[in-house]
Image: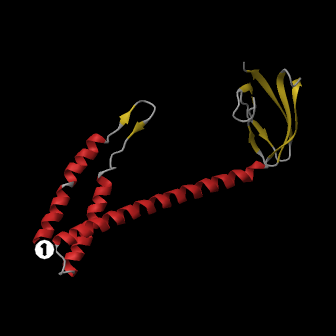
Amino acid sequence: MLRSHILICSILVLLAIPVYLVDNNTLKSSGGDWISLDLKGLLIGPYLVFIGIYISLSTLAVIYSHHFTIFKIHFYSAILSLAMLGIGLVLFDKVGKNSSAKKYNAKIDQRKSLFNNIQVKRWWFVPTAKKPKEIHVDLEVTSAGRLTALATGKENGEYGKDIFSSDGEVQHLVKAGEPIHYVFPLTIIN
């Protein structure tokens, strides 16, 4: 029984060579200039993890359970190994998503702390709102630093067609509590 077990495990280990070759040749980098997908390791990685789990489980079963046939041991070991691999992949995905969510939330919290740094006191169009050439804005900043701003006018809300946009992007050094008068020269978009 042990000889059959070693033979089956050796065949599965040797199968890693064609799996690697298929993985390396069919999943290599492809695509154009904009997006290039490199999926190398998509087959061989899970296969090697499966083989590691499978050989461990089946070896333990061969050593400790003498009343099962070699076929049953390897069949149930394969099913249990696939289940463990699937559970491991799901857990790995959840841990990755959780980590990404924590990083995203930390970044949002950092940005929220900056939201009240700039307060718009008032703004108006020059010469008129129907045919603006500039937008004037009175601002107050609560923290010292650099200030850069752009203005964009959209039709029908945030996702509407652009009507105008400001020209240029000039940085200003500002002091905490300093009132600022900002002028946005506009380009009308037809």
Residue found at x 32% / y 56%: 46
The image position of residue 44, as x and y in percent, is 29, 52
The image position of residue 54, as x and y in percent, is 26, 66
Quadrant for the C terminus in the image: top right
The image position of residue 137, as x and y in percent, is 85, 34
The image position of residue 66, as x and y in percent, is 17, 81
User: Going by the image, does 169 lie left or right of 73?
Assistant: right
User: Going by the image, does 52 lie left or right of 169?
Assistant: left
Q: Is residue 160 above or below residue 176?
A: above
Residue found at x 45% / y 63%: 91
Q: What amino acid type should be assigned to the residue bearing mark 1?
A: Leu
Disc 1: which residue: 2
Q: Is residue 132 above or below residue 62?
A: above
Residue found at x 17% / y 69%: 71
Q: Nearer the viewer, residue 152 or 94?
A: 94
The answer to whether residue 167 is visible is no
Q: Nearer the viewer, residue 110 or 61?
A: 61
